[in-house]
Image (cartoon, grey):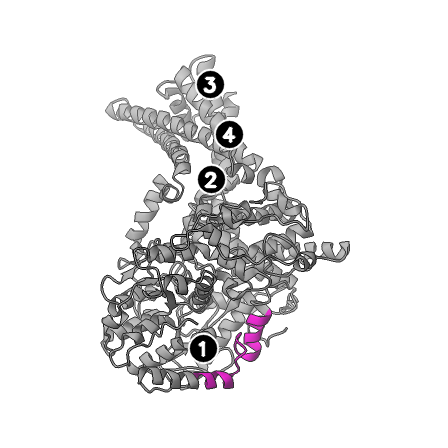
């Protein structure tokens, strides 16, 4: 049981990392597309982002340096990531459930990271962690752990309920509900474990510490004291592996949705670096079959764009 | 109200409409149009049309004939699937591959977008017009029939000829205004999916809205303009406009044609020349007065800034954009300035940005910016008191939400309209509502489509216009000016105002921005805006 649990935990983390990297690579390797931005664009400088203006508001804009504000981008991104500001503004009822769910996830993730750091520091500096810093870690782990699990559970249950009510009911597939049920089971088991046999998260912390220090050893204790943390770890590891394989990987996709599409306002200046890429894309073969195109897989985009009009 | 019970209904009961909206079910408009009993008559779709073409709801946009045999049905379904597959290849769809994949993969189906859609809202939230209704259908078709994924993961749908034909028709129930995309917490774009459906129909199946393709892009590429104007006719018309404008303003000028080495190539939407000649006349007057070095081009396509491909077909879009740029390159101008046409702005300035390279990569600028430069330069003097009437501003989606040109038009209004006379619509700027004519609707009027767009897609804008003028005397004795700096928006607004008889009943008149400027020009005779309905 011990070995299997550790193996599943390692596999879960590995699948998560590999799947996230694969997703990231997939999105980043997509070909350049036509500009399709939506304003406001958060990095637009000169105060224009506040009302949705762009550099196109300036005469002879191509002769002037662009005013790009990374701070402006951060001012939008950070509240969006942490507090789901767009959902709060445009769908407040859903936000009341989605925010606790997502923030709960963040806290559980933070709790896990704290356990990892605690494990590493405990192995490297046992004396340090036996003192006030160790106590601080214990408190932080407990606070983030309980808050995260409770918020995540409340949010997940609420979101499941919404999936059974119109209009979401008509647009949801079975897996949309199952995804949330998975969260409820994993978080519910973890919370039950904590309340029943691991009030200070010491056992789970020990397990996570062992994981990151590659110290595969059984947890101390007997019966539920060992059994429950192991079950929790297995379920959470499976959940972690599952998330990036589904549309819940939108935490990766969203970065590209904003940076590569919605805010992608970089102009193609004459003689600039984009022109070479565009030439390559215009050289792609076309196979669209409509009479006005008659793509045969040999004609290129450039051929079609510059040939005489067919009826 | 008749509406579909579920997404799967799209495949069922061919020949029966999926939705029907009764005027009495709608939310009343503000006064003096607040009596639902007095709503204009909505023309019914003829029985002949229902017999001949695929039926979706109360109107028809695309004229998709019902197949005559099972073989024909199967061929069209396969053709649709073939096009859908091509949408996911770099070769055939690099233009929108990433945005499309994003909108296919990551929708959480939270329905946040629905509340942002003016068509869904004004249809009393009829399910057929929910932005995600069509998106969900295309998504399910893709995952089930192309990716062969489990229906437990992505939902189930039956694919038959009825599904395909209704879906194409349904893609023409969206203005492509992308207000829904703006509210999506993840970045999903239902409008893009509508456009991709239109694109499959056009680029693979050869199914298009006649007004956009045959009478639009094709005519423009063959003759020079979707209005049918040849180079000779357009020059004649402009000459007449120059003379007529000079008579009205007392300022002589002559539109320059094909001037090599001019600073600016001005490209109007040719619809302005035909329907609102005062607009190109006002441009000529003010450009001349400001001493700008400018020209128009009599090259085929280059005197009509429209680019309907932006709504349904990447290839047609690219062809027109290239023609515009070639004309500018031939003249050797320093920049192209787009007249008051929103989609022409977006098409050539933003979207074509990743198509035009080398000699064709000539800078493009909005006329809002050029006109503001004239105001700021002080070369033309304005008397605000000549515009002493209530003014509101319609924000064309293409100009604001999709290009970020928000402030210049407001600064111009501030310079030519007396303080306290301008009032914003709510909401405005990048959060504006579409006029209801977006994505080609303004020029589409087959069967009873014109009535449908006045009644459904334009209703929110009309509501906004009325709300903006509340508190004013709503009669013809107290004229009010709705400024719409976009040709297609202006066409749609003209049609809505006429549909509700809003000039006669409420004194609401409409026009462009440059007309307001010339109306306030000190050197011009007063009364350029003539308040004559047309």
Q: Which mark is residue B273?
A: 1
Category of crowding for the residue at label 3, using alpha-carbon neighbours closer than 10 angstroms: few (below 14), some (14–19), many (at least 20):
many
Marks 1 and 4, how far apart in space?
62 Å
Tag nearer the camera, 4 or 2:
4
First in sequence, mark 3 or 4: give its number.
Answer: 4
Q: Are marks 4 and 2 on the same chain?
A: yes
Marks 3 and 4, how far apart in space?
17 Å
First in sequence, mark 2 or 3: give its number.
Answer: 2
Magenta region, residue range? B214-238
Q: Which mark is residue A182?
A: 4
Asked if residue B223 lies in the magenta stretch, the reply is yes
The answer to whether the residues at label 1 and label 3 have Cβ atoms under 8 Å apart is: no
Q: Are marks 2 and 3 on the same chain?
A: yes
The quarter holding residue B197 reads bottom right
Tag nearer the camera, 1 or 4:
1
Q: Which residue is mark 3?
A: A228
Element type where label 4 sits in the image: helix
Residue A230 lies, in percent from the top left, at 47, 21
Category of crowding for the residue at label 2, using alpha-carbon neighbours closer than 10 angstroms: few (below 14), some (14–19), many (at least 20):
some
First in sequence, mark 4 or 2: give its number.
Answer: 2
Q: Visible in this render: residue A28?
A: no
The quarter holding residue B504 reads bottom left
Tag nearer the camera, 1 or 3:
1
């Amino acid at each position: 049981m011990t070995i299997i649990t550790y193996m599943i935990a390692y596999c879960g983390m590995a699948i998560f990392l590999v799947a996230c990297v694969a997703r990231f690579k997939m999105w980043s390797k997509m070909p350049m597309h036509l500009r399709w931005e939506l304003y406001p664009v958060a990095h637009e400088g000169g105060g224009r982002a506040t009302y949705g203006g762009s550099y196109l508001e300036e005469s002879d804009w191509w002769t002037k340096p662009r005013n790009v504000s990374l701070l402006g981008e951060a001012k939008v991104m950070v509240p969006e990531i942490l507090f789901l500001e767009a959902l709060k503004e445009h769908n407040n009822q859903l936000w009341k459930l989605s925010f606790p769910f997502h923030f709960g996830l963040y806290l559980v993730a933070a709790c896990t990271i704290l356990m990892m750091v605690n494990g590493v520091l405990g192995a490297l500096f046992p004396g340090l962690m036996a003192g006030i810093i160790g106590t601080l870690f214990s408190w932080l782990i407990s606070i983030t752990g309980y808050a995260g699990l409770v918020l995540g559970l409340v949010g997940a249950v609420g979101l499941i309920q919404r999936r059974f009510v119109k209009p979401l009911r008509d647009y949801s597939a079975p897996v949309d509900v199952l995804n949330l049920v998975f969260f409820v089971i994993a978080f519910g088991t973890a919370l039950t474990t904590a309340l029943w046999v691991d009030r200070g998260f010491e056992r789970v912390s020990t397990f996570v510490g062992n994981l990151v220090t590659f110290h595969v050893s059984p947890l101390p204790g007997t019966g539920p004291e060992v059994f429950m943390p192991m079950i929790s770890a297995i379920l959470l590891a499976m959940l972690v592996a599952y998330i990036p394989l589904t549309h819940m990987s939108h935490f990766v996709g969203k970065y590209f949705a904003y940076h590569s599409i919605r805010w992608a306002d970089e102009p193609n200046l004459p003689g600039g670096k984009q022109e070479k890429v565009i030439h390559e894309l215009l050289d792609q073969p076309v196979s669209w079959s409509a009479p006005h195109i008659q793509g045969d897989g040999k004609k290129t985009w450039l051929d079609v764009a510059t040939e005489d009009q067919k009826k | 109200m008749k509406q579909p019970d579920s997404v799967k209904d799209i495949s069922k009961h061919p020949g029966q409409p999926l939705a029907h909206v009764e005027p009495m079910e709608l939310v009343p408009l503000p006064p003096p149009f607040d009596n639902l009993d007095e709503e204009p008559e909505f023309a019914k779709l003829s029985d002949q049309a229902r017999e001949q073409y695929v039926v979706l709801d109360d109107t028809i946009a695309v004229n998709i004939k019902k197949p005559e045999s099972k073989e024909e049905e199967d061929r069209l379904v396969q053709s649709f699937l073939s096009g859908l597959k091509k949408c996911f290849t770099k070769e055939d769809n690099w233009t929108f591959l990433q945005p499309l994949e994003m909108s296919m993969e990551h929708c959480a189906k939270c329905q946040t977008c629905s509340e942002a859609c003016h068509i869904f809202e004004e249809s009393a939230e009829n399910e057929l017009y929910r932005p995600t209704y069509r998106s969900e259908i295309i998504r399910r078709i893709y995952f089930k029939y192309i990716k062969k994924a489990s229906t437990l993961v992505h939902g189930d749908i039956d694919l038959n000829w009825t599904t395909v034909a209704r879906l194409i028709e349904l893609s023409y129930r969206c203005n492509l205004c992308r207000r829904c995309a703006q509210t999506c917490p993840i970045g999903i774009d239902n409008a893009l999916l509508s456009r991709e459906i239109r694109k499959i129909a056009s680029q693979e199946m050869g199914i298009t809205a006649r007004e956009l393709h045959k009478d639009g892009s094709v005519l423009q590429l063959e003759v020079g303009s979707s209005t049918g104007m040849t180079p000779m006719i357009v020059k004649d018309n402009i000459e007449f406009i120059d003379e007529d404008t000079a008579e009205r303003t007392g300022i002589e000028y002559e539109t320059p044609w094909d001037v090599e080495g001019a600073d600016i190539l001005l490209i109007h939407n040719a619809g302005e020349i035909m329907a609102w000649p005062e607009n190109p006349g006002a441009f000529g007057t003010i450009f001349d007065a400001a001493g700008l070095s400018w020209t128009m081009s009599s090259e085929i396509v280059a005197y009509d800034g429209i680019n309907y491909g932006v709504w349904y077909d990447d290839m047609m879009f690219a062809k027109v954009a290239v023609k515009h740029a070639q004309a500018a390159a031939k003249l050797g101008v320093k920049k192209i300035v787009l007249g008051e046409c929103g989609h022409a702005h977006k098409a050539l300035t933003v979207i074509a940005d990743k198509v035009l390279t080398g000699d064709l990569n000539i800078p493009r600028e909005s006329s809002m910016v050029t006109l503001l430069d004239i105001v700021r330069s002080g070369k033309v003097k304005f008397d605000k008191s000549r515009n002493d009437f209530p003014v509101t501003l319609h924000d064309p989606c293409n100009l604001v939400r999709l290009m970020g040109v928000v402030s210049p038009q407001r600064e111009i209004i501030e310079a030519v309209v007396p303080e306290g006379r301008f009032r914003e619509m709510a909401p405005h700027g990048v959060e504006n509502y579409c006029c209801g004519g977006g994505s080609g609707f303004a020029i589409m009027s087959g069967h009873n489509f014109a009535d449908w767009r006045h009644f459904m897609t334009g209703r929110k804008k009309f509501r906004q216009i009325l709300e903006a003028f509340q508190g004013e005397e709503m009669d013809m004795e107290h004229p009010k000016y709705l400024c719409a700096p976009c040709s297609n928006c202006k066409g749609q607004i003209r049609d809505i105002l006429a549909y509700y008889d809003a000039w006669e009943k409420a004194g609401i008149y409409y026009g462009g921005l440059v007309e307001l400027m010339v109306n306030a020009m000190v050197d011009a005779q007063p009364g350029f805006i003539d308040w004559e309905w047309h």
